[in-house]
Structure formats: C-alpha cells, structure tokens
Amino acid sequence: MLRKLLPHPFLTLTLIVVWQMLVNKLTLGNLLLGTILALIIPVITSPYWPNRPKLRSAPRIVEYVLVVLWDICVANVQVAYVILFKTNANTKPAWISIPLELRTPEAITVLAGTITMTPGTVSSDVAADGRSLLVHCLDAPDPDVVRDEIKTRYEARLKEIFE
Amino acid sequence: MLIDILISACLVISGIFGLVGSFGLIKLPDPMMRLHAPTKATTLGVGGALIASMLYFYFVVGNFSFHELMITLFLFLTAPITGHFIAKTHLHLLHKPADLPPTGTARPWASYESDAERQRIEAEQAAENPRA
C-alpha cells in the first residue's frame, strides 16, 4: 500500500525541496501545494522508470559532484586557453571510442553528461548495444590519455555509485 | 566594500568567459570543434553571473535566493542534451561511419544502425531471452 502511494520516496522529497526553492518563500500553503504535486507526479511517471537503479552510497555521490564541479572550472580555463592562444593548425581534434564497463542506462547517461561538461570533450554517440561511447576531443595530442582519465576518474566512481 | 569587490570580480570573470566562448564560435574551424566553445566556456560564464547574483541578494538586499541554484541545476541537466543533439545531427549530415573509430563491439554506432537492423536484433534477443 505504501509502495503504491510512494513509488519513489527520493523523487517525492526532491520535488518538495525543488518546489520550495522555485517559489523562494516558505509558507504553509506552498509546502502543502508542493507536497501534493510531489505525491501525484511520481505516481503518474512511475511507468516510465521500470528498473530504476539503486544508488549505493551518499558520500560517494557528494564526492563525485565535487570532483565534477572542480573539473568544470578547470575545463573552462583549458578550453579558453585553447581558443585564445593556440592556432587552429596546432589544435588536434580527435574522435575516441571509450569501451564501457557500466551497464545501467542511467549511469551511462550521467557519464555522457559529465564528459560533455568537462575538459575539452563532448560525448556524441553510443554504440547500438550500449557498450561504448563516441567522444569528440577538442585538443588531444594523445587520445589514450584522455580515455584512461575518463575511465579512472568518472567511470570507476559511477560504477561504485550505481552498480 | 569587500563584498562589492567580490561581486564585481564574479561579474568580470563571467563576462570574460562569455566573451571567450563567443570568440571560439568564430575562430574554431569545424562544427564539432565549435560545439566545445559554448558547452564549456559558457558554463563558468553563466555560473559567475549566478554567484554574483546570490552574493548580491544575500549581502546587499538581505534575503537568500534559491533561484540561482535552480538555474545552475537546470543548466547542468540541459546543456549536455543540447550538445548531444547537435553532435548527432552533425554525425548524420557530415560524417561517414568510416571517419569514426570502431565501436569495439559487434554493432555500429547508434546513429548508423538502420531501424530495420535494430528491430531484427532486438527481436532475436527477445526470442533468446523471453523474460528480459
């Protein structure tokens, strides 16, 4: 019974918090409206999430978010440097293929998003069976280094969180 | 006084990165490389403006505003998706499978697998493994 009413307790909690932040003013009415929405939306959307993964450890998620935020700051400076101080002839773009150990679709989505947000890489496509990612690098004299860094820095952490 | 300097610094940083990102759009030679400039340089550009706005509302106006955090969250959710769409369009229009590295698996990159082929493989897998 409780599972039917609350298919996603975390989603409900997130929706309540996001609603309060959007309204930006904590009143009883807003809290009530947010709670009603947060109860209805997960029930309506639950058919779209048939096998959602379990998130393993909260400290790991916080660590991952901090690592990614830091990398985004570094990425901005690196990309700005390439744009401003490297001639186009000296910039070596490359396509790389990253074999994936992750199998959960949600984890692969997070990895692809992270790759797009961080140093000089954009994820462009996934293999039809979901076992490797196609990534474009803005400036990669040595593509193997980029692949190893993505695998150790992001994929290993995501594997601990999702699988 | 100190807070004014901090807010100004955030705005200047944000302006510089926004400008560099836009300059990258003109300077870089091909569409895939141009995609890098707006997805990255702009993140810190927008981020700087949002931090400045939060500092201003907290220290000068005197109430804490959550809207900037929400904008950051939505930006992080949507920027990769837009980038992915543009990259996919680019793959379909201007690239051939031979230009790309191999997938390392039995099947090609998803953009180049025909619908008929995918349906055939998925039907085969469903037949082998009825519960999955």
Image: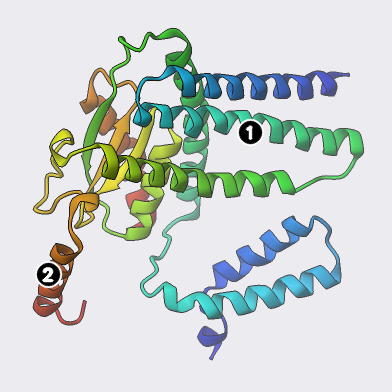
For discs 2 and 1, the disc positioned in front in the rendered view: 2
Q: Would you say B125 lies left or right of A57 here?
A: left
The relative height of residue A24 versus residue B24 in the rendered view (above or below) is: below
**Is residue B31 shown left or right of residue B39?**
left
Residue A136: quadrant of the picture: top left
Residue A47 sits above or below residue A97 on the image: below
Q: Measure how far apart labels 2 and 1 are at the Cα level.
A: 45 Å
Q: Position of residue A124 (x, y in %)?
A: 32, 42
For label 2, count other residues whose C-alpha is less than 10 Å away and answer few (under 14), some (14-19) or many (20+).
Answer: few
Q: Nearer the viewer, residue A14 or B85?
A: B85
Q: Residue at x 28, y 18 (%)?
A: A92
For image coordinates 45% across by 56% down, the residue present is A57
Which of the chains bears the disc numbered 1?
A: B
Quadrant of image for the C terminus of chain A: bottom left
Q: Which residue is mark 1?
A: B46
Amino acid carrying label 1: it is Val
